[in-house]
Amino acid sequence: MRETRLESSDFIYPLFVMHGKGIKQEISSMPGVFQWSPDLLADEAKSIAELGIPAVILFGIPESKDPVGLENFSENGIIQQSIRVIKQSVPDMVVITDVCLCEYTDHGHCGILNLGENKNPNLPEGYVLNDETLEILAKVAVSHAQAGADMVAPSGMMDGMVAAIRNGLDAHHFEHIPILSYSVKYASSFYSPFREAAQGTPKFGDRQSHQMDPANIREALREAALDVQEGADALMVKPALPYLDVIHLLRQTYPELTLAAYNVSGEYAMIKAAAANGWLDERRTILEILLSMKRAGADLIITYHAKEAAQWLKENQ
């Protein structure tokens, strides 16, 4: 009689990768989640695949940062290295890459800023320059595809980012690479642990100029519609748990499109902290939360709980 089923194949597992060797460094605010060096990724990818999880999404920590984020589209960048390791180890693993600038820029913002010699006097100092950023995002997506990525996921919420990336990929004969767009990304308080994990905290200001106001839902429909028009192959809502109504609305609006929910770092950290204090049954709570996202309409769930949830589902079977 069960109406909704949760399966390991619903999950996408996030991986944080950094330069070095022999690194498996636990993130203090996200117990059980690690930063990995590429040499250890092969075994980790195999363990993920053995649990029936079909996909990972990569977030890179560069060796050095600059105003543009040059390593983001370097042939030997940390993401490019990691893609090659995983595809060699587990060829059938779907490798998705986050396409944004915040982890790679010295200022920690999602785009090129209105600073320096070419500053536009008509715009506030430090303002994110949307159009100038699009060219960089296209370069990043092409570089990831050249390294072997199966899918790219732009997360910066720049206007026109899907079209720019689609045009860039198509121009380099990557018409087959799909785009999973962070179409509806809220300016949320649930991202703090991620910023520690990815070392991408803004040096100043915030991201409210381009991420969405948590009060808005009609805006979510407008943002999603723009990405669909530009050629997005799948849509994402981030965060997931406080925005199940948005997931449900997009499911009804776009029944033909794949819809992903991002069960973000703050949601993960809350459950881990409550469980560590004995306030919640960790296993039951996590599976209930993930089931709620599937019930709301998500086809895919990006979650740091993926490995443990997959193990529990396997035991239940």
Image (spheres, rainbow, N blue to C red):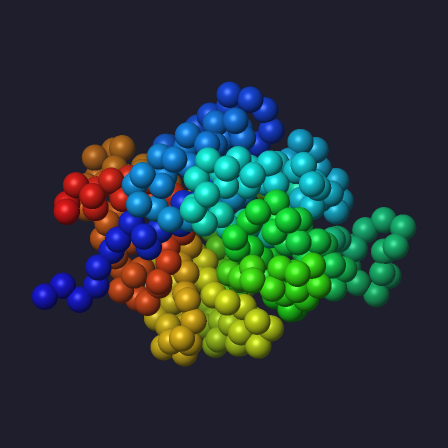
Asked if residue 291 is positioned above or below residue 66 in the image, the reply reads below
Asked if residue 184 is positioned above or below residue 221 in the image, the reply reads above
Q: Give the quadrant of residue 76.
A: top right
The image shows a total of numbered marks equal to 0
Most foreground residue, 163 or 157 = 163
Residue 185 position within the rendered picture, expressed as x and y whole percent measured from the top left? 51, 60
Residue 100 position within the rendered picture, expressed as x and y whole percent measured from the top left? 62, 51
Q: In the current view of this chain or complex, which residue is farthest to the right? A: 117
Q: In the current view of this chain or complex, which residue is farthest to the top? A: 22
Asked if residue 59 is positioned above or below residue 134 in the image, the reply reads above
Question: In the image, 142: left or right of 45?
Answer: right
Residue 207 position within the rendered picture, expressed as x and y whole percent measured from the top left? 60, 55
Q: Residue at x 31, y 45 (%)?
A: 52
Q: Residue at x 31, y 39 (%)?
A: 50
Q: Is residue 192 visible?
A: no
Q: Is residue 45 visible?
A: yes
Residue 17 position within the rendered picture, expressed as x and y whole percent measured from the top left? 54, 35
Most foreground residue, 117 or 134 = 134
Question: In the image, 47: left or right of 236?
Answer: left
Q: In the current view of this chain or complex, which residue is farthest to the left? A: 1
Which quadrant of the figure contains the N terminus? bottom left
Q: Residue at x 60, y 64 (%)?
A: 175
Q: Residue at x 14, y 47 (%)?
A: 317
